[in-house]
Amino acid sequence: MVIVKWMDKPTSEKKPEKNKDKEPAFMSYARYSGIAFQTGIVIGLFTWGGYELDKWLDTSPIFLAVGLFVGLILGVYYSIKDFIKKK
């Protein structure tokens, strides 16, 4: 014989609510791939600009290195800024 006390039963069974703030998976893939493309384009443009400036001024790797360094810094900065941006 099983005796069930009325205190043992939960008063209301709540189903776990879905997180309404969570974005769908394809949106996060699109967001992160966009950040990656943006970073690559910024680095590529600054490197290309440094290369062209070196060709124009005949200063071999100086502006190429500066363009690459500035592109890396800006690419990482914009990636971090977009990554932690509020929705």
Image (tube, grey):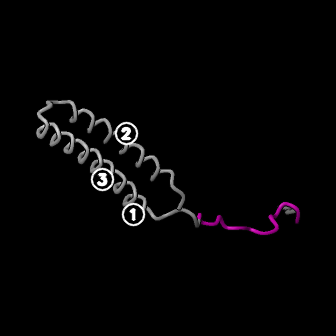
Residue 22 appears left or right of 44 = right
* Residue at figure coordinates x 30%, y 48% from the top left: 42
Q: Is residue 79 above or below residue 54?
A: below
Inspect the image, locate mark 1, and give the three-letter code of the amino acid beneath it. Answer: Phe
* Disc with the residue nearer the chain's start (1 vs 3): 1
> Where does the image place residue 73, in percent across and percent down from the top left?
37, 39
Q: Give the image quarter of residue 29.
A: bottom left
* Residue at figure coordinates x 26%, y 39% from the top left: 67
Residue 39 appears left or right of 21 = left
Residue 38 appears left or right of 79 = left
Q: How many marks?
A: 3
* Disc with the residue nearer the chain's start (2 vs 1): 1
Inspect the image, locate mark 2, and give the three-letter code of the amino acid beneath it. Answer: Ile
Q: Residues within 10 Å of mark 1 (few under 14, many from 20)?
A: few
Q: Give the image quarter of residue 55.
A: top left
Distance from disc 2 to disc 1, alpha carbons, whole Å, reads 28 Å
Q: Which mark is residue 73?
A: 2
Q: Examine the structure image and report whether residue 34 is included in the region drawn in magenta.
A: no
Residue nearest the observer in this picture, 49 or 80 = 49
- Tell me the residue that label 3 is attached to: 37
Region rendered in magenta: 6-19
Distance from disc 1 to disc 3, alpha carbons, whole Å, reads 16 Å
* Disc with the residue nearer the chain's start (3 vs 2): 3
Distance from disc 3 to disc 2, alpha carbons, whole Å, reads 15 Å
- Tell me the residue that label 1 is attached to: 26
Inspect the image, locate mark 3, and give the three-letter code of the amino acid beneath it. Answer: Phe
Predominant secondary structure, magenta span? loop
> Where does the image place residue 40, in percent across and percent down from the top left?
28, 48
